[in-house]
Image (spheres, rainbow, N blue to C red):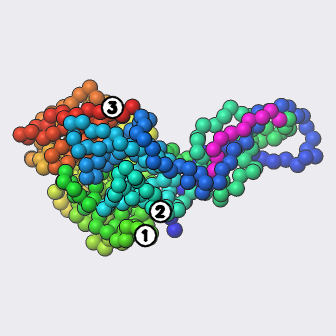
Amino acid sequence: MKSRLLLILFFATISFSCDDDGPYDDYLVARPVLMDAIAFKTEAIDITDPTPIISSGKIYAYKDYIFINDVDLGFHVLDNQDASNPKPIVFIKLEGTNDISIKDDKLFADSYGDLVIFDISDINNIQLTSRLENAIYNNNIWLASLEFPQADIYDYSEIDYDKDIVVGWEVKTERRSVAEYESQFVCDSCEFISNAENTSDSQPSVGQGGSLARFKIIGNYLYVVDYSNINIFDISNLETPKVLDDVQVAWDIETIFNQGAILFIGGRQGMYIYDIKNPEKPQFISEFRHGTACDPVVVDGDYAYVTLKGGNFCGNTESGLYVVDVSNLQNPELKVIYPMVGPNGLGVKDDRLFVCDGTDGLKVFDKSDAPNLVQISHFEDMIAYDVIPLEKSLLMIGDGTLRQYEYIDGTISLLSTINLN
């Protein structure tokens, strides 16, 4: 059974019998406006004309198209046949989503814990083909908006926690007992959770994501990491994926990357290594532990490159680029740490390592003498979040701006810039 994640911080009230004595007063009482979950999910999907991006997230490349995640809202699709002038062509509205993966014109995405599948064979006529309820994680109740109104009492007595979601609030002044008001409390035990690929520029049957990906298609299997598990789907029949047993990894896992039949799972506590020789049952091999930090990872040959981002919700670990020797999968060994400002995604192409260092821009390293790295380029004055090195070009997203670079005689130069805000 999939892990059950409670996606709401809520307030509970203690009810009292009508014959309670005691003083009364006027209070602002907020009641949730409810909507049936099935109806809400149906309305959360649409195909529209291009629209400005709200919060740019990950990027994904497939054929001549670039997909840019608008966090929790959907995906912007760009026609990239002319990389010097990419053009937005459509917006896939898909609320509650963070990632995608594509194989043979079938787009797999998450939406409020469901696995959603689109047919994109005609990019101008994208069709929803199926939705697997709670295939990634189960949720009993969640909010369409986490904005709480100003009120003295929050009354949840009318909610059916198995069927309803909150889409708004109604606030009225009501006369209530002072004892009731003083007895309401915040539920301290409740948990809140915010919200092998072809790397060619030709016509791949499987697209390519970056190091921040939670989705990974390998052969006939789709692997999706939620906050603690690897969710496994048999997609040999793309029209009707089969949900297989998930594998528990650790709490706060964030990313997935593979090198052949080995999975490297990035988490806030460490990097976890799994064998998928039996693709339906990943087997734990070992782990590399580090302090609490956000942790994407890419692997090339004998070395794993891990960016650790400290501060804010990521943890107290000092930000840096960790180079880990994984030649012995049973015993990964840290070789060197390179200081970073606030690193995010990273990628490898031949002897080049590309690191998105947040507000410090994009950094390019020569890794031919790994674990010793030599910085050869630094693109400053930009925010760098996610990067995908393709065969002939490099894609990079940050703060709503997509930049593309081309490789020329061992160096890279800017090819195009498009602001999606």
* Kind of element beneath mark 2: strand
* Kind of element beneath mark 3: strand
State how far apart marks 3 and 2 are (Cα).
33 Å
Residue at 68% of width from left, 32% of height from top? Answer: 150
Find residue 242 and report its image quarter.
bottom left
State how far apart marks 1 and 2 are (Cα).
8 Å
Q: Can residue 266 be found in the magenta stretch? A: no
Q: Which residue type does callout 1 highlight?
A: Thr
State how far apart marks 1 and 3 are (Cα).
37 Å
Residue 222 drawn at (x, y percent):
36, 63
Q: Which residues are magenta?
A: 165-174
Left or right of 215? Residue 228 is right
Q: Which residue type does callout 2 highlight?
A: Ser
Left or right of 412? Residue 42 is right
Residue 365 drawn at (x, y percent):
15, 40
Determine contact: label 1, label 2, CB under 8 Å.
Answer: yes
> Which quadrant of the figure contains the C terminus?
top left
Residue with the mark numbered 2: 130
Point out which mark residue 419 bears. 3
